[in-house]
Amino acid sequence: MAFSTEAVFREDSYLRETEAKVVGVNERGGIILDRTIFYATSGGQPGDTGLMVRDDGSQIAVAATITGESKDEIIHVPALHQAIPEVGERLRLAIDWPRRLLLMRMHAACHLLTVVCPYPITGASVHEEDSRVDFDIPDAGFTKEDVTAQLMELVRANHPIYNSWISDAELVANPTLVKSKNVRPPSGTGKIRLVCIGDNASIDSQPCGGTHVASTGEIGEIHIGKIEKKGRENRRFRIRFGAMPAN
Ligand SMILES: [Zn+2]
């Protein structure tokens, strides 16, 4: 039987610490809680790492977070040689916040890239240092300098980034919301989370379950490190932090 974990990060991506109760430990030592702030790997964003603190002050290091039998079941994978908590035990949770914040900034930057390059997305992968988005475009016609300039214009405008929820039926009625060519947003649960950028979503809105910063200004300085050709109709854009290096 799969558990259903309350995904606190979905409503509040800035919560760094909270408490939760152990509801299950699977045969491989994976810890399942009633609620969590640990994002589970999906949609190209890696899961959180961090710590669980027991009542006696001892710590359990979390090396990875993944989904289980269902998307609603979140499994905290301990590092090697950690103590295993009891079902029913209460734990204090703390995510590796500096790492998560980098991922939130990068993930939001990927959304901005899909605004600057409004083409079908064939893949994406978010990392702390370097992220990539693949687009279905026959010829780039883009230069990394131009794309960087347009991204930084959106960053400097400091647009708000916020969530709004729509029903499955509303999504079906607005198919252009979905920019991903291969991945359909999860449906059947009745509601879908849209990530909106700009007042009244004037810049963008698209279904996404990841974690993002609350404004484009928080992304900070970024640049396109590379535009690579991946097959005849595919271009891979790499986003990096910091100013574009000279030459
Ligand atoms: Zn997203």
Image (cartoon, rainbow, N blue to C red):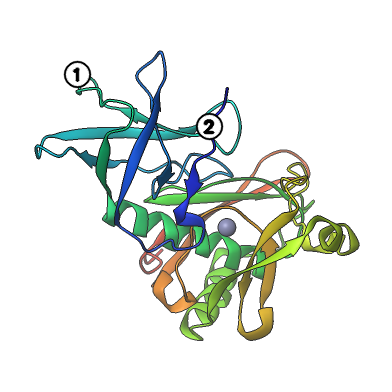
Residue 111, given in percent of the width and then of the height, sits at 59, 63
What type is the residue that disc 1 sits on? His
Q: Is residue 10 left or right of residue 23?
A: right
Question: For this view, does 23 lie left or right of residue 83?
Answer: right
Q: Residue 8 at x, y = what percent?
A: 45, 54
The amino acid pointed to by label 2 is: Phe
State how far apart marks 2 and 1 are (Cα). Answer: 25 Å
The vertical placement of 233 against 168, above or below, is above
Quadrant in which the C terminus appears:
bottom left
Q: Which residue is mark 2?
A: 3
Foreground of the two, 41 or 53: 53
**Residue 155 pos. (x, y %):** 49, 78
Asked which quadrant contains residue 174, the reply is: bottom right
Residue 184 in the image: above or below residue 217: above
Determine the residue positioned at 24% across, 20% down: 80
Q: Quadrant of the N terminus?
A: top right
Farthest residue in the right direction? 173
Question: Which label number is shown at residue 81?
Answer: 1
Whether residue 155 appears in this view of the structure is yes
Please tell me whether mark 2 or mark 1 is closer to you in this view. Answer: 2
Q: Quadrant of ligand 1?
A: bottom right
Viewer-side residue, 71 vs 229 = 71
Dot 2: within a 10 Å radius of its alpha carbon, few (fewer than 14), some, or many (20 or more) residues? some
Secondary structure state at the residue bearing disc 2: loop
Disc 1 Cβ-to-ligand 1 distance below 8 Å? no
